[in-house]
Image (cartoon, rainbow, N blue to C red):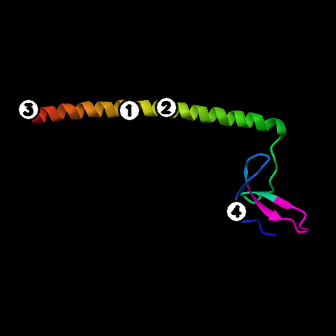
Amino acid sequence: MAALQKVYSCLSCGQEIKLARKEDNSGWDKFNLDGSPHVHPPKGGGKNTQQQQVQALANEVADMKAQIKILISQVQMLRSEFKELKERKDK
């Protein structure tokens, strides 16, 4: 039986999956997006994975903050240069 086109989030592990009704209508078969049967990660590994994801996001936020600070300083420099050029033009 074909899997449904809509993508769902697995209630146990949060991965994106597709569902297909079992032949005997006793429930649903779960499939990964690539068509392979969906298997949950080991119980102990889920917390580490979540902690790793949180750490990766925290690192990404820190990198973005640094980029924003650089961009702000560049905008400030451009403003001052523009102001100087405008003052020269007005003289």
* Residue that label 2 marks: 65
Residue at left 62%, top 34%?
Answer: 56
Q: Give the mark nearer the N terminus: 2 vs 4.
A: 4
Looking at the image, residue 65 lies above or below residue 7: above
- Which quadrant of the rendered structure holds the N terminus? bottom right
Q: Residues within 10 Å of mark 3 (few under 14, many from 20)?
A: few
Q: Is residue 6 magenta?
A: no
Q: Which percent across, then down, holds residue 19?
A: 78, 61
Cα–Cα gap, marks 3 and 4: 66 Å
Q: CA distance from mark 2 to mark 4?
A: 36 Å
Amino acid type of the residue tagged 4 in the rendering: Lys
Instruction: Name the residue that disc number 3 marks.
Output: 91
How far is mark 2 from mark 3, CA to CA?
A: 39 Å
Q: Count residues near mark 1 (Cα–Cα under 10 Å), then give few for <14, some for 14-19, many for 20+.
A: few
Residue 32: image tag:
none
Residue name at image x 19 percent, y 31 percent: 84
18 falls in the magenta region: yes
Q: Name the residue beneath numbered marker 4.
A: 6
How far is disc 1 from disc 4 in space, using C-alphas? 42 Å
Q: Name the residue carrying label 1.
A: 72
Where are the magenta residues, as a range? 17-29
Q: Are marks 1 and 3 in contact (CB under 8 Å)?
A: no
Residue for point 82% across, 35% down: 44
Q: Secondary structure at mark 4?
A: loop
Name the amino acid, label 3: Lys
- N-term mark: 1 or 4: 4
Amino acid at pointer 1 = Ile
- Label 1 near label 2: C-beta < 8 Å? no
Q: Position of residue 32 (x, y in %)?
A: 75, 55
| SS label for mark 3 | loop
